[in-house]
Image: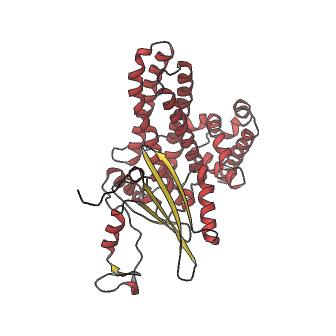
Amino acid sequence: MSEFINNATKRKDAIKEIIRLLHQGRTVEELQAEYGHIIAGASAQDIAAAEREVIGEGLPVSEVQKLCDLHVAVFQAGLEAEPAPENKPGHPLFGFRTENELIERTLESVEEQVKQYADGNHAVLQSLRENAKNLSLIPSHYDKKENMIFPVLEKYGFEGPSKVMWGVDNEIREELRQFNAILSAEKPLGVQLESSFTEVSRKVSDMVYKEEKVLFPEALGRLTAEDWQQMADEIAGNAGKPYSYQQPVGETAVGAGLIPLATGALSAEQLDLLLTNLPIDVTFVDENDEVRYFSQGKERIFTRTAAIIGRKVQNCHPPQSMHVVQKIIDDFRAGKRDSAEFWIQMQGMFVHIRYFALRDAAGKYRGVIEVSQNVAGIRALEGEKRLLD
């Protein structure tokens, strides 16, 4: 037993050293030759644990993210020996793996048409544009992964690697945006189009590999049957009210189960109806930076799933924007500001995003509320409307 522990420790230390040496510029070939005999048989769990530790020891997530592809190259031989995750119809991972297969097939199909266009067959352009619309499955797949798998894994201590993966997802989203921009030009330049798609395809294929060999095995090894069931219900749309954080109202309840407010009193059902039917997205984060509530309007702007309830708000944002969120919260908590707002254009919407500090009667910070609204229609209003249609 002691020999096994020593070998496991030696392997983990070797993996950490490899990550650091990659960061310093050593090549994949050099490290495979030097450490291959030690890391033979390294598992997905070994690599994930090593990544967590080097991040904890000060190597920035952004740096680990840059080296993510090289990590896979160094450890690929060991990862190939990992058994495939369960593949049962109805299991959430069955859907995730099926999507990965569809993504790979779509990449192959688009690649063939891109090559034809780059070789001078411009008659294929319209068909290519239609086919490329299928690539929208990629960001959709990442949205589900980030909002369903990542937050549950965090509850079991798997945090650093998922942040790294989220950062790479965002890089792929940007690569896709650039490819689509080139493709939408009146007469795309073939060489430019092919170069852009080659980069997209490489990164997406690498991400498929990482999910299959690292993320999914980690999830299968950590998530409970209840975790998977909640995820399956949400994917299937069976969870119309997927999860609600409820605190006992105790002495605050009045009348027939009514909750007293500053003006009036409402039942829990009435309060839920009120918040759900507001033409805005509302998310509440408490004084401990934990998400406690989000409204479920008919047309949500940003993805929210039941898994984020109780999650640290810092982990609900990709690494690239986390510092902005932290700055807002720090300023709110310190009393330096009471609100912050942003506006962005996306998918035909003009989205106004506002954050408000919540303070009790004594002025103590009690959390933050995020309010998001598509104001494109409001901005387009002109003249007056005084009568009902």
Relative vertical location of residue 67 with respect to residue 272 in this rendering, above or below: above
Residue 344 spot, x, y in % from top left: 51, 49
> In the image shown, does 339 or 126 lie closer to the viewer?
339
Q: Residue at x 57, y 59 (%)?
A: 314
Give the side of residue 52 with respect to residue 128, left or right. right
Farthest residue toward the front?
A: 383
> In the image shown, does 30 or 116 lie closer to the viewer?
116
Relative vertical location of residue 147 with respect to residue 267 in this rendering, above or below: above
Residue 316 spot, x, y in % from top left: 53, 56
Relative vertical location of residue 195 with respect to residue 318 in this rendering, above or below: above
Q: Quadrant of the C terminus?
A: bottom left
Residue 182 spot, x, y in % from top left: 51, 28
| Quarter of the figure with residue 203 | top right
> In the image shown, does 365 or 165 lie closer to the viewer?
365
Relative vertical location of residue 115 with respect to residue 10 in this rendering, above or below: above
Residue 233 spot, x, y in % from top left: 34, 55
> In the image shown, does 257 or 17 lie closer to the viewer?
257
